[in-house]
Image: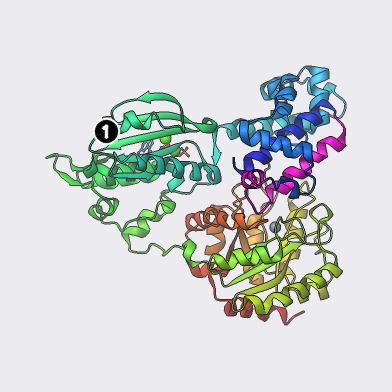
Amino acid sequence: MRNDQVVEHLDAIADLLEIKGESPFRVNAYRDVARRIAHHPEEISILAEEQRLRSIPGVGETLAARIVELIQRGTTETYEELARSMPAGLRDLLAVPGLGPKRVRQLYDQLSIASLPDLEAAVQAGRLRAVPGFGAKTEERMLRDLARLRQRVRRHLLGEAWPLAEEIAAALRALRLAERVEVAGSIRRRLETIGDLDIVIASARPEAFAARAVALPVVEQVQEHGPTKLTLLTQRDVQLDIRVVAPHEFGSALLHFTGSKQHNIHLRAMAQERGWKVNEYGLFDEATGARLAGLTEEEMYARLGLAWIPPELREDAGEIEAAAAGRLPTLITEADVRGELHAHTDWSDGGASLEAMAEAARARGYAYLAITDHSRSRAVAGGLSVERVREQRAAIAALKARYAPFSILAGSEVDIRADGTLDYDDETLAAFDFVVASVHSGFAQSRDVMTQRLLNALAHPAVDVLGHPSGRLIGKREGYELDVEAVIAAAARHGKALEINSQPDRLDVRDTVARRAHEAGVLLCVATDAHSPRHYAALRFGIGQARRAWLPAEAVINTWPLERLLTWRRRRLDVL
Ligand code: DGT
Ligand code: CA
Ligand code: CA
Ligand code: ZN
Protein backbone atom coordinates (compact mmCIF):
# COMPACT_ATOMS: atom_id res chain seq x y z
CA MET A 1 0.00 0.00 0.00
CA ARG A 2 1.33 3.39 -1.01
CA ASN A 3 1.59 6.33 1.37
CA ASP A 4 -1.03 8.36 -0.49
CA GLN A 5 -3.51 5.52 -0.09
CA VAL A 6 -2.89 5.42 3.67
CA VAL A 7 -3.32 9.20 3.79
CA GLU A 8 -6.59 9.01 1.85
CA HIS A 9 -7.95 6.37 4.25
CA LEU A 10 -7.05 8.32 7.39
CA ASP A 11 -8.53 11.48 5.90
CA ALA A 12 -11.70 9.57 5.09
CA ILE A 13 -11.98 8.47 8.72
CA ALA A 14 -11.41 12.04 9.89
CA ASP A 15 -14.09 13.34 7.50
CA LEU A 16 -16.65 10.78 8.62
CA LEU A 17 -15.89 11.39 12.31
CA GLU A 18 -16.31 15.09 11.77
CA ILE A 19 -19.61 14.73 9.91
CA LYS A 20 -20.76 12.52 12.75
CA GLY A 21 -19.92 15.30 15.18
CA GLU A 22 -17.19 13.49 17.08
CA SER A 23 -14.75 15.42 19.25
CA PRO A 24 -12.33 17.66 17.35
CA PHE A 25 -9.56 16.04 19.35
CA ARG A 26 -10.23 12.64 17.79
CA VAL A 27 -10.70 14.10 14.33
CA ASN A 28 -7.44 16.02 14.50
CA ALA A 29 -5.53 12.98 15.70
CA TYR A 30 -6.30 11.32 12.34
CA ARG A 31 -5.72 14.48 10.32
CA ASP A 32 -2.35 15.23 11.90
CA VAL A 33 -1.07 11.74 11.29
CA ALA A 34 -2.40 11.78 7.71
CA ARG A 35 -0.47 15.00 7.07
CA ARG A 36 2.69 13.59 8.60
CA ILE A 37 2.47 10.48 6.47
CA ALA A 38 1.85 12.56 3.34
CA HIS A 39 5.16 14.26 3.95
CA HIS A 40 6.99 11.27 5.35
CA PRO A 41 10.24 10.43 3.57
CA GLU A 42 9.82 6.65 3.97
CA GLU A 43 7.31 4.05 2.78
CA ILE A 44 4.75 3.53 5.54
CA SER A 45 4.36 -0.15 4.67
CA ILE A 46 8.06 -0.60 5.39
CA LEU A 47 7.75 1.26 8.70
CA ALA A 48 4.86 -1.06 9.56
CA GLU A 49 6.82 -4.16 8.65
CA GLU A 50 9.73 -3.06 10.81
CA GLN A 51 7.38 -2.05 13.63
CA ARG A 52 8.57 1.54 13.50
CA LEU A 53 5.15 3.19 13.00
CA ARG A 54 5.30 4.74 16.45
CA SER A 55 8.30 6.78 15.40
CA ILE A 56 5.78 8.99 13.57
CA PRO A 57 4.75 11.77 15.96
CA GLY A 58 1.11 11.35 16.99
CA VAL A 59 0.98 7.62 16.28
CA GLY A 60 0.24 5.72 19.47
CA GLU A 61 -0.53 2.07 20.00
CA THR A 62 -4.12 2.28 18.73
CA LEU A 63 -3.38 4.21 15.57
CA ALA A 64 -0.37 2.02 14.80
CA ALA A 65 -2.63 -1.04 15.04
CA ARG A 66 -5.17 0.61 12.70
CA ILE A 67 -2.47 1.35 10.12
CA VAL A 68 -1.21 -2.23 10.26
CA GLU A 69 -4.80 -3.44 9.82
CA LEU A 70 -5.22 -1.07 6.87
CA ILE A 71 -2.07 -2.31 5.16
CA GLN A 72 -3.06 -5.95 5.70
CA ARG A 73 -6.78 -5.75 4.85
CA GLY A 74 -6.98 -2.69 2.61
CA THR A 75 -9.49 -1.14 5.04
CA THR A 76 -10.20 -0.81 8.76
CA GLU A 77 -13.05 -1.78 11.05
CA THR A 78 -13.15 1.85 12.26
CA TYR A 79 -13.80 3.06 8.74
CA GLU A 80 -16.32 0.36 7.89
CA GLU A 81 -18.29 1.04 11.04
CA LEU A 82 -18.43 4.76 10.31
CA ALA A 83 -19.35 4.13 6.69
CA ARG A 84 -22.23 1.88 7.79
CA SER A 85 -23.56 4.58 10.08
CA MET A 86 -24.26 7.14 7.35
CA PRO A 87 -25.12 7.39 3.64
CA ALA A 88 -22.19 6.69 1.34
CA GLY A 89 -22.58 9.91 -0.66
CA LEU A 90 -22.32 12.21 2.32
CA ARG A 91 -18.55 12.46 2.21
CA ASP A 92 -18.62 13.48 -1.48
CA LEU A 93 -20.36 16.68 -0.37
CA LEU A 94 -17.16 17.81 1.35
CA ALA A 95 -15.64 18.36 -2.10
CA VAL A 96 -18.03 21.29 -2.64
CA PRO A 97 -16.21 24.53 -1.81
CA GLY A 98 -17.73 26.14 1.25
CA LEU A 99 -19.18 22.90 2.61
CA GLY A 100 -17.40 21.71 5.72
CA PRO A 101 -18.47 18.76 7.85
CA LYS A 102 -20.82 20.85 10.02
CA ARG A 103 -22.62 22.23 6.99
CA VAL A 104 -22.89 18.78 5.45
CA ARG A 105 -24.44 17.49 8.66
CA GLN A 106 -26.85 20.45 8.69
CA LEU A 107 -27.96 19.85 5.09
CA TYR A 108 -28.47 16.19 5.84
CA ASP A 109 -30.47 16.78 9.00
CA GLN A 110 -32.62 19.58 7.61
CA LEU A 111 -33.04 18.74 3.91
CA SER A 112 -32.09 15.03 3.77
CA ILE A 113 -29.32 15.88 1.31
CA ALA A 114 -27.08 12.79 1.23
CA SER A 115 -25.22 13.00 -2.09
CA LEU A 116 -24.03 15.40 -4.78
CA PRO A 117 -27.11 14.71 -6.99
CA ASP A 118 -29.35 15.40 -3.95
CA LEU A 119 -27.56 18.70 -3.44
CA GLU A 120 -27.85 19.69 -7.07
CA ALA A 121 -31.59 18.96 -7.07
CA ALA A 122 -32.07 20.99 -3.90
CA VAL A 123 -30.12 23.95 -5.29
CA GLN A 124 -32.07 23.87 -8.53
CA ALA A 125 -35.35 23.81 -6.62
CA GLY A 126 -34.17 26.82 -4.59
CA ARG A 127 -34.54 24.85 -1.34
CA LEU A 128 -31.10 25.68 -0.04
CA ARG A 129 -31.76 29.32 0.68
CA ALA A 130 -34.21 28.21 3.37
CA VAL A 131 -31.23 27.06 5.43
CA PRO A 132 -29.59 29.80 7.49
CA GLY A 133 -26.26 30.86 6.01
CA PHE A 134 -27.16 29.99 2.42
CA GLY A 135 -28.40 32.59 -0.05
CA ALA A 136 -29.26 32.93 -3.73
CA LYS A 137 -25.66 33.87 -4.40
CA THR A 138 -24.33 30.71 -2.73
CA GLU A 139 -26.74 28.67 -4.82
CA GLU A 140 -25.50 30.23 -8.02
CA ARG A 141 -21.87 29.55 -7.16
CA MET A 142 -22.70 26.05 -6.00
CA LEU A 143 -24.29 25.14 -9.34
CA ARG A 144 -21.03 26.03 -11.09
CA ASP A 145 -18.99 24.06 -8.57
CA LEU A 146 -21.29 21.06 -8.89
CA ALA A 147 -20.95 21.06 -12.68
CA ARG A 148 -17.18 21.06 -12.27
CA LEU A 149 -17.32 18.20 -9.75
CA ARG A 150 -19.41 16.11 -12.14
CA GLN A 151 -16.64 16.64 -14.68
CA ARG A 152 -14.02 15.57 -12.17
CA VAL A 153 -15.28 12.06 -11.54
CA ARG A 154 -14.75 11.35 -15.21
CA ARG A 155 -11.11 12.48 -15.44
CA HIS A 156 -8.00 11.43 -13.56
CA LEU A 157 -4.83 13.33 -12.72
CA LEU A 158 -1.86 12.66 -15.01
CA GLY A 159 0.12 12.01 -11.83
CA GLU A 160 -2.10 9.02 -11.02
CA ALA A 161 -2.96 7.76 -14.50
CA TRP A 162 0.57 7.78 -15.92
CA PRO A 163 2.20 5.57 -13.24
CA LEU A 164 -0.79 3.22 -13.44
CA ALA A 165 -0.48 2.99 -17.24
CA GLU A 166 3.24 2.28 -16.95
CA GLU A 167 2.60 -0.43 -14.39
CA ILE A 168 0.06 -2.07 -16.72
CA ALA A 169 2.33 -1.70 -19.76
CA ALA A 170 5.13 -3.43 -17.82
CA ALA A 171 2.79 -6.29 -16.90
CA LEU A 172 1.75 -6.62 -20.56
CA ARG A 173 5.38 -6.67 -21.70
CA ALA A 174 6.11 -9.38 -19.17
CA LEU A 175 3.61 -11.65 -20.94
CA ARG A 176 6.18 -11.91 -23.75
CA LEU A 177 3.45 -12.18 -26.37
CA ALA A 178 3.88 -8.73 -27.90
CA GLU A 179 6.76 -7.18 -29.84
CA ARG A 180 5.82 -3.67 -28.82
CA VAL A 181 3.77 -2.25 -25.92
CA GLU A 182 3.47 1.53 -25.65
CA VAL A 183 1.28 3.91 -23.68
CA ALA A 184 -0.56 6.26 -26.08
CA GLY A 185 -3.50 8.70 -25.81
CA SER A 186 -3.53 11.77 -23.60
CA ILE A 187 -1.00 10.23 -21.19
CA ARG A 188 1.64 10.15 -23.91
CA ARG A 189 0.80 13.78 -24.66
CA ARG A 190 1.13 14.50 -20.88
CA LEU A 191 -2.23 16.22 -20.70
CA GLU A 192 -2.89 17.39 -17.13
CA THR A 193 -5.99 15.19 -16.78
CA ILE A 194 -6.77 11.86 -18.40
CA GLY A 195 -10.09 10.44 -19.52
CA ASP A 196 -9.02 6.84 -20.12
CA LEU A 197 -5.79 4.90 -20.59
CA ASP A 198 -4.78 3.86 -24.11
CA ILE A 199 -2.14 1.23 -24.78
CA VAL A 200 -1.05 0.18 -28.27
CA ILE A 201 0.35 -3.27 -28.86
CA ALA A 202 2.03 -4.98 -31.78
CA SER A 203 1.69 -8.74 -31.67
CA ALA A 204 1.95 -11.57 -34.11
CA ARG A 205 -0.19 -13.67 -31.72
CA PRO A 206 -3.08 -11.34 -30.86
CA GLU A 207 -5.48 -14.03 -29.55
CA ALA A 208 -2.97 -15.51 -27.14
CA PHE A 209 -2.02 -12.03 -26.02
CA ALA A 210 -5.61 -10.94 -25.39
CA ALA A 211 -6.44 -14.10 -23.46
CA ARG A 212 -3.56 -13.49 -21.08
CA ALA A 213 -4.12 -9.73 -20.85
CA VAL A 214 -7.70 -9.98 -19.57
CA ALA A 215 -6.53 -12.33 -16.83
CA LEU A 216 -4.04 -9.87 -15.33
CA PRO A 217 -4.69 -8.98 -11.69
CA VAL A 218 -5.13 -5.26 -12.52
CA VAL A 219 -8.19 -6.09 -14.62
CA GLU A 220 -11.38 -5.77 -12.62
CA GLN A 221 -13.87 -6.12 -15.42
CA VAL A 222 -13.82 -6.85 -19.17
CA GLN A 223 -16.14 -4.54 -21.05
CA GLU A 224 -15.24 -5.39 -24.61
CA HIS A 225 -13.13 -8.26 -25.89
CA GLY A 226 -12.64 -8.13 -29.67
CA PRO A 227 -9.78 -9.29 -31.89
CA THR A 228 -8.16 -5.84 -32.14
CA LYS A 229 -9.62 -3.96 -29.20
CA LEU A 230 -9.93 -4.70 -25.50
CA THR A 231 -11.79 -2.35 -23.20
CA LEU A 232 -11.13 -3.08 -19.56
CA LEU A 233 -11.85 -1.56 -16.19
CA THR A 234 -8.81 -1.47 -13.93
CA GLN A 235 -8.36 -0.61 -10.27
CA ARG A 236 -9.97 2.60 -9.12
CA ASP A 237 -12.52 2.43 -11.98
CA VAL A 238 -10.06 3.65 -14.58
CA GLN A 239 -10.94 2.54 -18.11
CA LEU A 240 -8.23 1.06 -20.31
CA ASP A 241 -8.35 0.67 -24.09
CA ILE A 242 -5.86 -1.79 -25.54
CA ARG A 243 -5.46 -1.80 -29.34
CA VAL A 244 -3.70 -4.74 -30.92
CA VAL A 245 -2.19 -4.43 -34.41
CA ALA A 246 0.31 -6.34 -36.53
CA PRO A 247 3.97 -5.35 -36.07
CA HIS A 248 4.23 -3.60 -39.47
CA GLU A 249 1.26 -1.39 -38.48
CA PHE A 250 2.64 -0.31 -35.12
CA GLY A 251 3.81 3.19 -36.10
CA SER A 252 0.51 4.20 -37.64
CA ALA A 253 -1.46 2.74 -34.70
CA LEU A 254 0.72 4.54 -32.15
CA LEU A 255 0.32 7.79 -34.09
CA HIS A 256 -3.44 7.38 -34.37
CA PHE A 257 -4.09 6.46 -30.75
CA THR A 258 -1.74 9.10 -29.38
CA GLY A 259 -3.86 11.81 -30.96
CA SER A 260 -4.93 14.37 -30.34
CA LYS A 261 -7.99 14.00 -32.44
CA GLN A 262 -7.39 17.49 -33.85
CA HIS A 263 -3.81 16.61 -34.75
CA ASN A 264 -5.03 13.46 -36.54
CA ILE A 265 -7.67 15.38 -38.46
CA HIS A 266 -5.05 17.83 -39.70
CA LEU A 267 -2.74 14.98 -40.79
CA ARG A 268 -5.61 13.28 -42.57
CA ALA A 269 -6.36 16.47 -44.53
CA MET A 270 -2.70 16.69 -45.57
CA ALA A 271 -2.80 13.07 -46.76
CA GLN A 272 -5.99 13.67 -48.70
CA GLU A 273 -4.44 16.60 -50.56
CA ARG A 274 -1.88 14.12 -51.88
CA GLY A 275 -4.46 11.51 -52.84
CA TRP A 276 -3.61 9.40 -49.80
CA LYS A 277 -5.48 7.94 -46.87
CA VAL A 278 -4.23 7.65 -43.29
CA ASN A 279 -5.62 5.49 -40.48
CA GLU A 280 -4.43 3.30 -37.63
CA TYR A 281 -3.25 0.62 -40.07
CA GLY A 282 -0.98 2.81 -42.20
CA LEU A 283 -0.66 5.43 -44.90
CA PHE A 284 -2.08 4.29 -48.24
CA ASP A 285 -2.42 5.49 -51.82
CA GLU A 286 -6.15 6.08 -52.26
CA ALA A 287 -6.18 5.00 -55.93
CA THR A 288 -3.99 1.91 -55.87
CA GLY A 289 -4.31 0.92 -52.24
CA ALA A 290 -0.51 0.67 -52.12
CA ARG A 291 0.97 0.88 -48.62
CA LEU A 292 3.25 3.93 -48.22
CA ALA A 293 4.16 3.81 -44.50
CA GLY A 294 3.15 2.37 -41.14
CA LEU A 295 6.04 0.65 -39.38
CA THR A 296 7.21 3.70 -37.42
CA GLU A 297 5.87 7.15 -36.56
CA GLU A 298 8.96 8.72 -38.10
CA GLU A 299 8.16 7.03 -41.41
CA MET A 300 4.55 8.24 -41.30
CA TYR A 301 5.55 11.86 -40.66
CA ALA A 302 8.40 11.76 -43.18
CA ARG A 303 6.05 10.60 -45.96
CA LEU A 304 3.91 13.66 -45.23
CA GLY A 305 6.98 15.91 -45.44
CA LEU A 306 7.17 16.42 -41.68
CA ALA A 307 9.80 15.95 -39.01
CA TRP A 308 8.74 13.61 -36.17
CA ILE A 309 6.61 15.64 -33.77
CA PRO A 310 6.99 15.11 -30.00
CA PRO A 311 3.66 13.82 -28.59
CA GLU A 312 3.34 16.74 -26.16
CA LEU A 313 2.98 19.14 -29.10
CA ARG A 314 0.31 17.17 -30.93
CA GLU A 315 -2.65 19.46 -30.30
CA ASP A 316 -2.92 21.09 -33.74
CA ALA A 317 -1.64 24.28 -32.18
CA GLY A 318 0.93 25.14 -34.85
CA GLU A 319 3.15 22.06 -34.51
CA ILE A 320 2.35 20.68 -37.97
CA GLU A 321 3.24 23.99 -39.63
CA ALA A 322 6.43 24.16 -37.55
CA ALA A 323 7.36 20.58 -38.49
CA ALA A 324 6.78 21.34 -42.18
CA ALA A 325 9.02 24.40 -41.94
CA GLY A 326 11.72 22.56 -39.97
CA ARG A 327 11.13 24.86 -37.01
CA LEU A 328 10.11 22.51 -34.23
CA PRO A 329 11.67 23.56 -30.92
CA THR A 330 14.16 21.31 -29.14
CA LEU A 331 12.09 20.65 -26.05
CA ILE A 332 13.40 20.53 -22.50
CA THR A 333 13.90 17.04 -21.02
CA GLU A 334 14.22 15.84 -17.44
CA ALA A 335 17.94 15.34 -18.05
CA ASP A 336 18.37 19.09 -18.67
CA VAL A 337 17.38 19.95 -15.10
CA ARG A 338 20.34 20.86 -12.89
CA GLY A 339 18.62 21.80 -9.69
CA GLU A 340 15.49 22.05 -7.56
CA LEU A 341 14.39 25.55 -6.60
CA HIS A 342 11.33 24.91 -4.44
CA ALA A 343 11.65 22.45 -1.55
CA HIS A 344 10.54 22.23 2.07
CA THR A 345 12.14 20.60 5.09
CA ASP A 346 11.01 19.74 8.60
CA TRP A 347 11.96 23.30 9.56
CA SER A 348 8.46 24.15 8.24
CA ASP A 349 5.90 21.63 6.95
CA GLY A 350 8.22 19.23 5.14
CA GLY A 351 8.66 15.67 6.30
CA ALA A 352 12.43 15.35 6.00
CA SER A 353 15.54 17.02 7.36
CA LEU A 354 17.70 19.48 5.49
CA GLU A 355 20.34 16.78 5.12
CA ALA A 356 17.89 14.20 3.77
CA MET A 357 16.55 16.67 1.20
CA ALA A 358 20.08 17.63 0.16
CA GLU A 359 21.29 14.03 -0.06
CA ALA A 360 18.38 13.05 -2.27
CA ALA A 361 18.78 16.07 -4.56
CA ARG A 362 22.45 15.32 -4.97
CA ALA A 363 21.68 11.64 -5.59
CA ARG A 364 19.46 12.71 -8.49
CA GLY A 365 22.50 14.27 -10.06
CA TYR A 366 21.52 17.86 -9.30
CA ALA A 367 24.13 20.57 -8.87
CA TYR A 368 22.05 22.69 -6.51
CA LEU A 369 19.00 22.81 -4.26
CA ALA A 370 17.17 25.82 -2.88
CA ILE A 371 15.59 25.22 0.51
CA THR A 372 12.42 27.30 0.48
CA ASP A 373 10.53 26.77 3.71
CA HIS A 374 7.40 28.75 4.49
CA SER A 375 7.47 32.28 5.86
CA ARG A 376 6.35 33.44 9.29
CA SER A 377 2.63 34.10 8.62
CA ARG A 378 2.08 30.48 7.58
CA ALA A 379 1.85 29.36 11.18
CA VAL A 380 -0.15 26.23 10.28
CA ALA A 381 2.71 25.18 8.00
CA GLY A 382 5.41 25.95 10.56
CA GLY A 383 6.45 29.20 8.87
CA LEU A 384 9.89 30.43 9.97
CA SER A 385 10.33 33.49 12.19
CA VAL A 386 13.15 35.88 11.30
CA GLU A 387 15.13 34.28 14.10
CA ARG A 388 14.57 30.78 12.69
CA VAL A 389 15.54 32.03 9.23
CA ARG A 390 18.90 33.05 10.67
CA GLU A 391 19.31 29.71 12.40
CA GLN A 392 18.48 27.87 9.21
CA ARG A 393 20.97 29.89 7.21
CA ALA A 394 23.64 28.94 9.73
CA ALA A 395 22.61 25.28 9.53
CA ILE A 396 22.87 25.40 5.74
CA ALA A 397 26.24 27.15 5.88
CA ALA A 398 27.49 24.43 8.19
CA LEU A 399 26.63 21.81 5.57
CA LYS A 400 28.38 23.63 2.75
CA ALA A 401 31.77 21.93 2.94
CA ARG A 402 30.23 18.50 3.39
CA TYR A 403 28.29 18.67 0.14
CA ALA A 404 30.53 20.74 -2.14
CA PRO A 405 30.54 21.06 -5.10
CA PHE A 406 26.80 20.45 -4.70
CA SER A 407 25.28 23.75 -3.48
CA ILE A 408 22.46 24.38 -1.05
CA LEU A 409 20.82 27.80 -1.39
CA ALA A 410 19.21 29.31 1.70
CA GLY A 411 15.89 30.38 0.22
CA SER A 412 12.31 31.02 1.19
CA GLU A 413 8.81 30.49 -0.07
CA VAL A 414 7.56 33.80 1.15
CA ASP A 415 3.86 34.50 1.45
CA ILE A 416 2.41 37.31 -0.58
CA ARG A 417 0.12 38.77 2.05
CA ALA A 418 -3.42 39.89 1.29
CA ASP A 419 -2.29 43.52 1.02
CA GLY A 420 0.38 42.63 -1.55
CA THR A 421 3.33 43.03 0.82
CA LEU A 422 5.77 40.21 1.45
CA ASP A 423 5.96 38.30 4.70
CA TYR A 424 9.48 39.45 5.71
CA ASP A 425 11.17 42.83 5.95
CA ASP A 426 13.47 43.87 3.09
CA GLU A 427 16.63 43.15 5.04
CA THR A 428 15.61 39.57 5.71
CA LEU A 429 14.47 39.13 2.13
CA ALA A 430 17.73 40.51 0.73
CA ALA A 431 19.73 37.97 2.72
CA PHE A 432 18.12 34.94 1.06
CA ASP A 433 19.94 33.19 -1.78
CA PHE A 434 16.67 32.51 -3.58
CA VAL A 435 13.06 33.61 -3.12
CA VAL A 436 9.82 32.07 -4.34
CA ALA A 437 6.78 34.27 -3.61
CA SER A 438 3.38 32.57 -3.35
CA VAL A 439 -0.23 33.22 -2.43
CA HIS A 440 -1.56 30.89 0.26
CA SER A 441 -4.47 32.92 1.66
CA GLY A 442 -7.18 35.37 0.71
CA PHE A 443 -8.18 33.47 -2.42
CA ALA A 444 -11.55 35.21 -2.63
CA GLN A 445 -10.15 38.62 -3.54
CA SER A 446 -11.43 40.39 -6.64
CA ARG A 447 -9.57 40.06 -9.92
CA ASP A 448 -8.16 43.59 -9.67
CA VAL A 449 -7.00 43.26 -6.08
CA MET A 450 -5.44 39.83 -6.66
CA THR A 451 -3.69 40.97 -9.84
CA GLN A 452 -2.26 44.01 -8.06
CA ARG A 453 -1.14 41.76 -5.21
CA LEU A 454 0.85 39.59 -7.63
CA LEU A 455 2.24 42.61 -9.47
CA ASN A 456 3.52 44.01 -6.17
CA ALA A 457 5.31 40.76 -5.44
CA LEU A 458 6.82 40.62 -8.92
CA ALA A 459 8.05 44.19 -8.56
CA HIS A 460 9.98 43.41 -5.36
CA PRO A 461 13.68 43.08 -6.24
CA ALA A 462 14.26 40.12 -3.90
CA VAL A 463 11.64 37.91 -5.54
CA ASP A 464 12.94 35.45 -8.13
CA VAL A 465 9.96 33.27 -8.90
CA LEU A 466 6.20 33.53 -8.58
CA GLY A 467 5.18 30.19 -7.02
CA HIS A 468 2.12 28.24 -8.29
CA PRO A 469 0.83 31.47 -9.86
CA SER A 470 -2.82 30.59 -10.44
CA GLY A 471 -3.50 28.91 -7.09
CA ARG A 472 -5.64 26.20 -8.66
CA LEU A 473 -5.96 22.64 -7.36
CA ILE A 474 -7.11 20.54 -10.29
CA GLY A 475 -10.58 19.16 -9.68
CA LYS A 476 -10.77 20.75 -6.24
CA ARG A 477 -10.36 24.48 -6.53
CA GLU A 478 -10.39 26.92 -9.41
CA GLY A 479 -7.51 29.34 -9.35
CA TYR A 480 -8.21 32.79 -7.99
CA GLU A 481 -9.48 35.50 -10.32
CA LEU A 482 -6.51 36.94 -12.13
CA ASP A 483 -5.43 39.03 -15.12
CA VAL A 484 -2.95 36.53 -16.52
CA GLU A 485 -1.75 38.88 -19.26
CA ALA A 486 -0.87 41.55 -16.72
CA VAL A 487 1.08 39.03 -14.64
CA ILE A 488 3.00 37.84 -17.70
CA ALA A 489 3.77 41.43 -18.72
CA ALA A 490 5.00 42.26 -15.22
CA ALA A 491 7.17 39.15 -15.04
CA ALA A 492 8.71 40.13 -18.38
CA ARG A 493 9.26 43.71 -17.28
CA HIS A 494 10.91 42.79 -13.99
CA GLY A 495 12.84 39.80 -15.34
CA LYS A 496 11.15 37.30 -13.00
CA ALA A 497 10.35 33.67 -13.58
CA LEU A 498 6.96 31.99 -13.32
CA GLU A 499 6.84 28.59 -11.68
CA ILE A 500 5.55 25.43 -13.30
CA ASN A 501 4.72 23.58 -10.11
CA SER A 502 5.00 19.84 -10.76
CA GLN A 503 2.61 18.58 -8.08
CA PRO A 504 0.03 16.51 -9.98
CA ASP A 505 -2.95 18.48 -8.66
CA ARG A 506 -1.29 21.86 -9.29
CA LEU A 507 0.59 21.85 -12.62
CA ASP A 508 0.59 25.58 -12.17
CA VAL A 509 1.12 27.60 -14.37
CA ARG A 510 -0.66 25.43 -16.85
CA ASP A 511 0.70 24.56 -20.30
CA THR A 512 -1.08 27.26 -22.30
CA VAL A 513 -0.09 30.03 -19.89
CA ALA A 514 3.53 28.85 -19.83
CA ARG A 515 3.59 28.94 -23.62
CA ARG A 516 2.23 32.48 -23.73
CA ALA A 517 4.68 33.56 -21.05
CA HIS A 518 7.60 32.11 -22.99
CA GLU A 519 6.45 33.87 -26.15
CA ALA A 520 6.40 37.10 -24.14
CA GLY A 521 10.02 36.51 -23.11
CA VAL A 522 9.28 35.34 -19.57
CA LEU A 523 11.49 32.69 -17.96
CA LEU A 524 10.02 29.66 -16.23
CA CYS A 525 11.10 27.44 -13.34
CA VAL A 526 10.03 23.79 -13.25
CA ALA A 527 9.87 22.99 -9.54
CA THR A 528 8.44 20.12 -7.51
CA ASP A 529 7.55 21.90 -4.26
CA ALA A 530 8.93 18.76 -2.60
CA HIS A 531 7.93 18.17 1.00
CA SER A 532 9.92 14.94 1.10
CA PRO A 533 12.66 13.35 -1.03
CA ARG A 534 10.04 11.15 -2.70
CA HIS A 535 8.42 14.26 -4.21
CA TYR A 536 11.42 15.08 -6.40
CA ALA A 537 10.11 12.36 -8.72
CA ALA A 538 7.12 14.59 -9.57
CA LEU A 539 9.48 16.56 -11.81
CA ARG A 540 8.41 14.58 -14.86
CA PHE A 541 4.85 15.88 -14.58
CA GLY A 542 6.10 19.48 -14.63
CA ILE A 543 8.50 18.71 -17.46
CA GLY A 544 5.54 17.26 -19.40
CA GLN A 545 3.74 20.58 -19.05
CA ALA A 546 6.89 22.53 -19.98
CA ARG A 547 7.16 20.46 -23.15
CA ARG A 548 3.47 21.03 -23.90
CA ALA A 549 4.33 24.73 -23.57
CA TRP A 550 6.99 24.39 -26.31
CA LEU A 551 9.79 25.27 -23.88
CA PRO A 552 13.42 24.69 -24.77
CA ALA A 553 15.79 24.04 -21.85
CA GLU A 554 17.26 27.56 -21.85
CA ALA A 555 13.83 29.08 -21.07
CA VAL A 556 13.82 27.25 -17.73
CA ILE A 557 16.10 28.75 -15.09
CA ASN A 558 16.79 25.51 -13.21
CA THR A 559 18.48 24.02 -16.29
CA TRP A 560 21.13 26.74 -16.00
CA PRO A 561 24.47 26.24 -14.28
CA LEU A 562 24.46 27.76 -10.78
CA GLU A 563 26.74 30.63 -11.79
CA ARG A 564 24.34 31.82 -14.44
CA LEU A 565 21.40 31.54 -12.05
CA LEU A 566 23.19 33.61 -9.41
CA THR A 567 24.29 36.25 -11.92
CA TRP A 568 20.71 36.53 -13.15
CA ARG A 569 19.41 37.34 -9.65
CA ARG A 570 22.40 39.45 -8.56
CA ARG A 571 21.84 42.01 -11.30
CA ARG A 572 18.47 42.79 -9.77
CA LEU A 573 19.52 42.61 -6.13
CA ASP A 574 21.92 45.53 -6.41
CA VAL A 575 18.79 47.68 -6.19
CA LEU A 576 18.04 46.58 -2.62
P1 DGT B 1 -8.73 11.43 -22.97
O1 DGT B 1 -8.80 9.93 -22.92
O2 DGT B 1 -10.04 12.09 -22.97
O3 DGT B 1 -7.84 12.00 -21.91
O4 DGT B 1 -8.03 11.86 -24.37
P2 DGT B 1 -7.40 10.96 -25.51
O5 DGT B 1 -6.72 11.88 -26.43
O6 DGT B 1 -6.61 9.87 -24.92
O7 DGT B 1 -8.69 10.42 -26.26
P3 DGT B 1 -9.29 8.97 -26.51
O8 DGT B 1 -8.89 8.01 -25.44
O9 DGT B 1 -10.74 9.16 -26.73
O10 DGT B 1 -8.66 8.51 -27.89
C1 DGT B 1 -7.30 8.23 -28.04
C2 DGT B 1 -6.82 8.79 -29.34
O11 DGT B 1 -7.47 8.11 -30.43
C3 DGT B 1 -7.16 10.25 -29.57
O12 DGT B 1 -6.23 11.11 -28.99
C4 DGT B 1 -7.12 10.32 -31.06
C5 DGT B 1 -7.68 8.99 -31.50
N1 DGT B 1 -9.11 9.16 -31.79
C6 DGT B 1 -10.14 8.83 -31.01
N2 DGT B 1 -11.30 9.14 -31.61
C7 DGT B 1 -10.99 9.69 -32.80
C8 DGT B 1 -11.74 10.23 -33.89
O13 DGT B 1 -12.96 10.26 -33.88
N3 DGT B 1 -11.04 10.72 -34.97
C9 DGT B 1 -9.69 10.69 -35.02
N4 DGT B 1 -9.05 11.17 -36.07
N5 DGT B 1 -8.95 10.21 -34.01
C10 DGT B 1 -9.59 9.71 -32.92
CA1 CA C 1 -7.45 8.25 -23.56
CA1 CA D 1 -9.50 5.73 -25.22
ZN1 ZN E 1 5.99 25.29 -1.38
Residue 180 or residue 309, whichever sits in front: 180
For the residue marked with disc 1, what is the amino acid? Pro
Residue 185 appears in view: yes
Give the percent coordinates (x, y) of residue 280.
28, 39
436 left or right, relative to 382: left
Residue 138 or residue 530, whichever sits in front: 530
- The residue singled out by tag 1 in the image is 206
In the image, residue 345 sits, relative to residue 144, either above or below, namely: below
263 left or right, relative to 410: left
Give the percent coordinates (x, y) of residue 237.
52, 30
Magenta residues, start to end: 22-50
Residue 305 in magenta?
no
Residue 49 in magenta?
yes
Residue in the image at 33% along x and 64% along y: 326
Circle 1 crowding by C-alpha within 10 Å: few under 14, some 14–19, many from 20: some
Residue 78 or residue 122, whichever sits in front: 78
